[in-house]
Image (cartoon, rainbow, N blue to C red):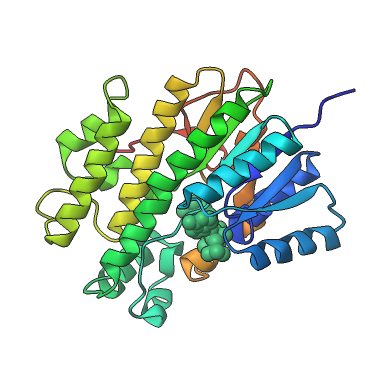
Amino acid sequence: MEERRCAVVTGGNKGIGFEICRQLALNGIEVVLTARNESRGLEAIEKLNAFGIPNVVFHQLDIKNSTSIANLSKFIETRFKKLDILVNNAAENGVVYVDDKRFKDGGGFGTQFGAIQAGLGCFTNVRDIVKAINRLLMSCTVGFVKCTEALVPLLQFSKTPRIVNVSSVYGDLHWFRNDELKQELLDIENLTEERIDEIIQWFLKDFKAAKLHENGWPLTPSAYKVSKAALNAYTRLMARKFQNILVNAVHPGCVLIDMTSNTGIVTAEEGAKAPVMAALLPDDGPSGAYFNKMEIAPFMTT
Ligand SMILES: NC(=O)c1ccc[n+]([C@@H]2O[C@H](COP(=O)([O-])OP(=O)(O)OC[C@H]3O[C@@H](n4cnc5c(N)ncnc54)[C@H](OP(=O)(O)O)[C@@H]3O)[C@@H](O)[C@H]2O)c1
């Protein structure tokens, strides 16, 4: 009898994460839908059960909380003895919308033009922005790395281990204007996790000192772009470190969802397709790659 595979999806209670859970379950995977808020997670499970999907189970996970990560790891070890797929989907966008209407009227994130217009018009001079970007960087970098490290030992028991890091076109290094930094982030042979952490701290320092333009950082939404570029770099380092695991980063498309103030182009169902494809890659699939939706793409476009 074929062994059943199991997956963990972070931030599975809504949006793209919820759809990833649904589609993986429809592919016969045992899915652990995680959410930081227990009632939101259980509600999502009820919804999936109502769709006639029984092979989903809830477990609480806040990727910024070490105890929560350790509890999830213990749960998987006890219940499944291994893990086949980890989808790192949970993230915040680090954006505080000063003028949500103007953002939407500008086209939101749905069009390049709209995003730039809205970015300039709506995200600047925000009082709570430093708090928001700290939250974002904590979840998209520190939390995501800690969660992955805690679950890798269980992935090592799988015959087909996969890690999918949900990234974004905003992680493209072409948004950076500091050529030296771009090269450093591209030079995966010499890059280290410690150096990525230093780069994030450097970004935060420059953000607080209003030196983003001067030092060639990506502009609005700058923290989100830096966090996704860091996530892409971590993806490549993880692929190098864990050679038996296929580790890839995936841009799902611009999805109509809370994170984009409902200004995306495609549905969550459509957006989940590429992360699910990367989760179900055959053994001879790529590792350390970046998929722009269903296609492999460069980490820096020209
Ligand atoms: N939407 C797009 O157009 C788009 C485009 C490119 C990439 N992405 C990426 O796709 C992924 C999913 O985004 P989405 O659009 O589906 O956003 P979303 O609807 O806002 O969902 C984000 C999910 O992450 C969870 N989350 C946030 N911080 C967390 C934490 N510390 N611990 C655990 N869960 C946490 C949220 O939980 P709560 O419900 O508790 O807040 C929610 O379940 C993200 O990585 C995003 O960057 C999205």
**Residue in the image at 23% along x and 41% along y:** 199
Whether 172 is drawn above or below 94: the answer is above
**Front residue of 168 and 115:** 168
Indicate the quadrant where residue 178 lies.
top left
**Residue in the image at 12% along x and 49% along y:** 215
Indicate left or right for 178 with 185 as reference.
left
Whether 14 is drawn above or below 1: the answer is below
**Residue in the image at 66% along x and 49% along y:** 20
Can I make out residue 255 in this image?
Answer: no
- What is the x, y in percent for residue 166? 51, 45
Indicate left or right for 236 with 25 as reference.
left
**Residue in the image at 53% along x and 54% along y:** 62
The C terminus lies in quadrant: top left
- What is the x, y in percent for residue 135? 37, 59
Whether 43 is drawn above or below 9: the answer is below
Can I make out residue 25 in this image?
Answer: yes
Indicate left or right for 112 with 185 as reference.
right
